[in-house]
Amino acid sequence: MYFVFSVLGLIGGLLCCTGDILFDLKGKGNEKLGTSKNIDSNWLKMADRRFGLSIVLAMIGDALVGLGFYSIGMQIAETHSLTGYLTIGFGYFGVMAGVFVHSFLCIQALIYKGAMMRGNLQIADDILEKIYKQIMPTFLLGYASLLVPTVLVIIAILNGALDVPKICILLNLIVFLIFGTVCRKIDPVKFQDLPGIIMPSFGLSMFGLIGMFSLI
């Protein structure tokens, strides 16, 4: 059963990647607008259904990622119970926060599109700035929560609690985030969207992959 959960965790992460693409693949000519630069001008060109589908994929994907956390956490708990249970707990909290934040980001785009039908950027900015300030603490807390199982899994690999090659410590959220950031620094235009926008979700899928490797 743990193997099945790990497979589902991998699939869940990839579904989240797809949801990220639907929401955040903005294309050429996009400009950051608003007080906090949290508005993308190209949202106007994107179909409403993209944002709705993105929310659905995030909801399903994060639920499956949670199963991946459960699988890898229980495998770790067989020899290091506290580490395993902390992996599950922080992992579940992180993915719950992820669904919440992702949904609000998609709703922001729809609010902006609706406001701009009347050609009023100021109203859109005023509304979205209030929303942005309220969801940022949850966003940061959720990200911080996901860093905990990332570190715990690295420790579990190094101390042998997970029977996988040590090179698997590179298959994690932090490494992929750094990779996406470096790509944008190298060429901000070419790598404006991909691969950076999917790196966090791709990192989540690795919990499932490592869990699978550990059971093979």
Image: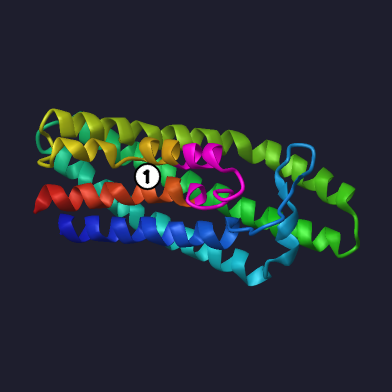
Q: Residue at x 51, y 53 (%)?
A: 194
- Tag 1, which secondary structure? helix
Start and end of the magenta stretch?
A: 180-197
Residue at horizontal 20%, vertical 61%? 4
Coloring applied to the structure: rainbow
Rendering coords of residue 87 (x, y %) = 28, 37
Q: Is residue 163 left or right of residue 200?
A: left
The quarter of the rendered structure image containing the C terminus is bottom left
In screen coordinates, is 124 left or right of 131?
A: right
Q: Position of residue 66 (x, y in %)?
A: 34, 51
Nearer the observer, 197 or 84: 197
Residue positioned 26% across, 31% down in the render? 152
- The picture places residue 19, in percent across and down from the top left corner, at 50, 61
Q: Position of residue 90 (x, y in %)?
A: 36, 37
Question: Foreground residue, 101 or 21?
Answer: 21
One can see residue 95 in this view: yes
63 with respect to 72 (left or right): right
When the figure is inspected, residue 187 is found, relative to residue 111, above or below; the finding is above
Label 1 crowd (10 A; few <14 / some 14-19 / many >=20): many
- Left-right relation of 14 to 97: left
- Say whether residue 81 is visible: no
Residue highlighted by disc 1: 92
In this view, 209 is above or below 156: below
Check the picture and name the quadrant holding the N terminus.
bottom left
Q: Is residue 182 magenta?
A: yes
Q: Amino acid at mark 1?
A: Tyr
Task: Out of 27 and 141, give the one closest to the viewer.
Answer: 27
Instruction: Residue 207: say if magenta.
Output: no
Task: Name the residue: 21% across, 40% down.
Answer: 168
